[in-house]
C-alpha cells in the first residue's frame, strides 16, 4: 500500500495486489453499510413533539385540556392535549425535577387524566450512539484512504525502480546516435566514479535531455542505467507536485535517499512541470518548495556517490534558471526528431525486435523517406497499425499497402464510414482539394504530392497530402510563400468555380495555417517588405503599438499578394483544375503520380524546385 507505482505495475493476481484488494473491498463495504445504517437511524428517528413549560402543563390539567400523560421517571413526561369530538389531540413534551413528579401525578389523576408510565429512553440513547458510531466510522475510513494515498505517493521513489528484470542498453536505441554518444561518458562515470575523481574530473550531476515528445528520452535514460549496470529510479514531474503541503518535498527527499544508498540514475520526466520558473503564480508556493528541495538535494551529494540525475523536457525555456546553472542540470543533450536514416534504423529495429514478417514489396527505406517529422513513438505505432491491417486482411506478411493504410491513418486520420453529403457539397470538396493539389504542385514542387482524396477522414471531408523529398532544416522565402499559395489553393478554387458568394467554411483550418506562416515570416524571420528586419520577441521587450500595427498591415499585404498570385495560377490552369476535380469525383482518391500525369496532360508545369 505504500508505493503507488508498485500498485500500478503489480500483476492483478499477485499476493500484494490481492491483499490490498481485500483491504480496499472491506473498507468500501464498511463505509457502504455505515452510510446505510446512518440513513436508517435517521429514518427511525421520529419528530420530537413540542416542549411546554411545567406551569402550562399544570394549568392545562386544571382546565381539563390534558387528555393523557405518559410519565418517564427521572426525565419528564409526554402527553396529549384534549381534542374536539372526532379529532386527535396534539402531543407535547415537558420536563420537571423528579421530586415534583408525585404531586403532578396525583393532580392529574384527580382531574381525570389518563396517567401511564414509560421505561427510560434506552432506544433513543441507542439511536444516538449508533449515529455517532457510524459517523466516526465514515470519517475514519475517509481519513484512512487519504493517509494511504499520501503514504503511497510518498514512496514513489522506491517503487519507480525497474523490477521486471529487463535491461535496456544503447543497442535498443535507434535514431538518436548523437545523443547516445554524449551519454556514453556518463556510463563510464557510473561504472568507475572513483577513477574520474582521482584525476579531478567532475562529471555533470545533472543532464537535461531536450526534444519533442516521442523521441526516446526515457529510453536513453534507461539505456544509461542498463549499460552501467546500476539501478534506475524514475519519477514524473506531475507525480511530484501535489496539493498537500510538504508532500512534494518529501517525495524528492525519498527519491534521493534511495538513490544514494545504491547509486544509479535518477530520471525525472516532465521536468518543466516540477522545475518551472518560481514566482510566476503566487498560488503555487507548494511547487516552489518542491523545486527548492530538488535544488538542495542536487547540491547535497558528492561526485563519488555514483548518482547522476537525468531530466527530460520538451520546453526548456520554461525551466527555472537555478536548475540549469553549473553544478545542476548544466549539460543539455538534444534529442531531435530522427533524420531519414534514423527513421529507417528505428523501423528496422522495431521490425527485428517484434518479429514482424515483411512482404517482398515492404520497403522500409521508402517508408522512412515518406514519413518526415515522425518521432520514434509514431513510427512504432505506424508499424503496429500496419500489422493490424495485415491481420485484418488475413495476410501472413505485412505488405506495402498495409504501410500506406497505416501512414494515411496516422497522418490523415481514420476514414469516416457511412458519411453522406449532398452532391453539391461533394463537388465543392473535389474542387477545394484539387485547388490545393494544383497550387502545391505549381508553386511548391519541393514537396511531392503523395495523395489527394475526397474520402472524409477525421474532421476533414477531404485531404491533399504533400511530403517533402527529404528532411528540410532551412526554409527560404520562396518556399514559405509556396506553402501559403498551397494553403490558399482550396479557397481560391471555390471562388473561381462557384463565385465569391459561394465560398465555404472548408478553408477554416487552411486560413489558420497560412496566417501562422505569414506572421512568422514577418514577425519572427524578418521577411517583411516594409518592416524589414524588425522582429517581435519577448526577450526584446514589447513592441510599440505603431510597430505592431505595421506588422499586422504587412501580414495582410503579404496574404493579399499571395492570394492574387494563387488566383492567377489556377485561372491560367483552369483545365487542369477541372480535370483533377473530375478525377476525384470519379475515383474519390488519386495518388501523386496520377495527379502529376493529369496536370501534365493539360499543360500545367511546375516551376523548378529549389532549396
Image (cartoon, rainbow, N blue to C red):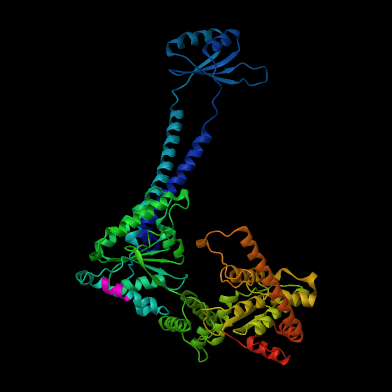
In the image shown, does 432 or 359 lie closer to the viewer? 432
Confirm whether the magenta stretch covers residue 188.
yes
Q: Can you give x and y, in whole percent of width and height, for residue 130 in the image?
A: 43, 35
Quick one: which residue is furthest to the left in this view? 198
Taking the image as shown, residue 469 lies to the left or right of residue 12, namely right
Residue at left offset 56%, top offset 76%: 410
Q: Quadrant of residue 99?
A: top left
In the image shown, does 65 or 550 lie closer to the viewer? 550
- In the image, which residues are magenta? 184-189
Taking the image as shown, residue 24 lies to the left or right of residue 398, namely left
Image height of 498 relative to 306, above or below? below
Residue 1 in view? no
In the image shown, does 282 or 243 lie closer to the viewer? 282
In the image shown, does 1 or 106 lie closer to the viewer? 1
Image height of 129 relative to 420, above or below? above
Confirm whether the magenta stretch covers residue 69.
no
Amino acid at each position: 500500500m505504500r508505493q503507488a507505482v508498485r500498485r500500478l505495475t503489480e500483476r492483478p493476481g499477485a499476493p500484494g495486489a490481492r491483499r490490498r484488494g481485500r483491504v480496499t473491498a472491506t473498507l468500501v463495504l464498511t463505509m457502504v453499510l455505515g452510510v446505510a445504517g446512518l440513513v436508517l437511524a435517521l429514518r427511525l428517528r421520529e419528530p420530537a413533539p413540542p416542549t411546554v413549560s411545567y406551569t402550562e402543563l399544570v394549568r392545562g390539567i386544571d382546565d381539563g385540556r390534558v387528555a393523557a400523560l405518559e410519565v418517564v421517571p427521572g426525565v419528564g413526561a409526554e402527553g396529549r392535549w384534549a381534542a374536539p369530538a372526532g379529532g386527535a389531540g396534539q402531543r407535547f413534551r415537558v420536563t420537571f425535577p423528579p421530586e415534583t413528579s408525585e404531586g403532578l401525578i396525583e393532580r392529574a389523576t384527580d382531574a381525570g387524566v389518563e396517567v401511564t408510565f414509560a421505561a427510560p429512553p434506552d432506544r433513543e440513547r441507542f439511536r444516538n450512539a449508533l449515529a455517532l458510531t457510524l459517523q466516526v466510522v465514515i470519517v475514519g475510513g475517509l481519513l484512512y484512504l487519504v493517509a494511504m494515498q499520501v503514504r503511497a505517493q510518498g514512496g514513489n521513489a522506491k517503487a519507480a525502480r525497474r523490477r521486471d528484470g529487463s535491461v535496456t542498453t544503447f543497442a535498443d536505441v535507434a535514431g538518436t546516435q548523437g545523443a547516445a554518444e554524449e551519454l556514453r561518458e556518463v556510463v563510464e562515470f557510473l561504472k568507475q566514479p572513483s577513477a574520474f575523481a582521482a584525476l579531478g574530473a567532475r562529471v555533470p550531476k545533472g543532464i537535461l535531455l531536450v526534444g519533442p515528445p516521442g523521441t526516446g528520452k526515457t529510453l536513453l535514460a534507461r539505456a544509461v542505467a542498463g549499460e552501467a549496470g546500476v539501478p534506475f529510479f524514475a519519477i514524473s514531474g506531475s507525480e511530484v507536485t501535489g496539493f498537500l503541503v510538504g508532500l512534494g518535498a518529501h517525495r524528492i527527499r525519498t527519491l534521493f535517499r534511495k538513490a544514494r544508498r545504491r547509486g544509479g540514475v535518477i530520471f525525472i520526466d516532465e521536468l518543466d512541470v516540477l522545475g518551472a520558473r518560481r514566482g510566476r503564480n503566487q498560488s503555487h508556493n507548494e511547487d516552489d518548495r518542491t523545486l527548492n528541495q530538488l535544488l538542495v538535494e542536487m547540491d547535497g551529494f558528492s561526485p563519488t556517490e555514483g548518482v547522476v540525475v537525468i531530466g527530460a523536457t520538451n520546453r526548456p525555456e520554461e525551466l527555472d534558471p537555478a536548475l540549469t546553472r553549473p553544478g545542476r542540470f548544466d549539460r543539455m543533450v538534444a534529442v531531435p526528431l530522427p533524420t531519414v536514416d534514423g527513421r529507417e534504423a528505428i523501423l528496422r529495429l522495431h521490425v527485428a525486435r517484434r518479429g514482424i514478417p515483411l512482404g517482398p514489396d515492404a520497403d522500409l527505406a521508402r517508408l522512412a523517406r515518406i514519413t518526415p517529422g515522425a518521432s520514434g513513438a509514431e513510427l512504432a505505432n505506424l508499424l503496429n497499425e500496419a500489422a493490424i491491417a495485415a491481420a485484418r486482411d488475413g495476410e501472413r506478411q505485412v505488405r506495402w499497402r498495409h504501410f500506406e493504410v497505416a501512414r494515411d491513418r496516422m497522418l490523415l486520420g481514420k476514414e469516416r464510414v457511412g458519411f453522406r453529403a449532398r452532391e453539391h457539397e461533394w463537388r465543392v470538396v473535389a474542387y477545394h482539394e484539387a485547388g490545393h493539389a494544383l497550387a502545391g504542385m505549381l508553386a511548391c514542387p519541393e514537396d511531392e504530392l503523395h495523395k489527394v482524396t475526397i474520402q472524409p477522414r477525421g474532421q476533414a471531408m477531404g485531404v491533399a497530402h504533400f511530403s517533402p523529398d527529404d528532411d528540410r532544416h532551412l526554409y527560404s522565402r520562396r518556399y514559405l510563400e509556396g506553402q501559403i499559395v498551397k494553403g490558399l489553393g482550396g479557397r481560391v478554387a471555390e471562388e473561381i468555380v462557384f463565385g465569391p458568394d459561394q465560398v465555404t467554411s472548408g478553408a477554416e483550418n487552411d486560413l489558420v495555417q497560412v496566417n501562422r506562416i505569414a506572421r512568422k515570416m514577418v514577425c519572427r524571420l524578418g521577411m517583411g517588405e516594409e518592416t524589414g528586419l524588425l522582429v517581435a520577441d519577448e526577450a526584446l521587450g514589447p513592441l510599440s503599438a505603431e510597430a505592431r500595427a505595421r506588422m499586422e498591415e504587412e501580414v495582410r499585404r503579404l496574404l493579399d499578394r499571395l492570394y492574387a498570385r494563387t488566383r492567377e495560377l489556377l485561372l491560367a490552369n483552369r483545365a487542369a483544375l477541372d480535370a483533377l476535380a473530375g478525377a476525384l469525383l470519379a475515383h474519390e482518391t488519386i495518388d501523386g503520380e496520377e495527379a502529376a500525369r493529369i496536370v501534365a496532360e493539360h499543360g500545367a508545369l511546375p516551376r523548378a524546385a529549389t532549396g
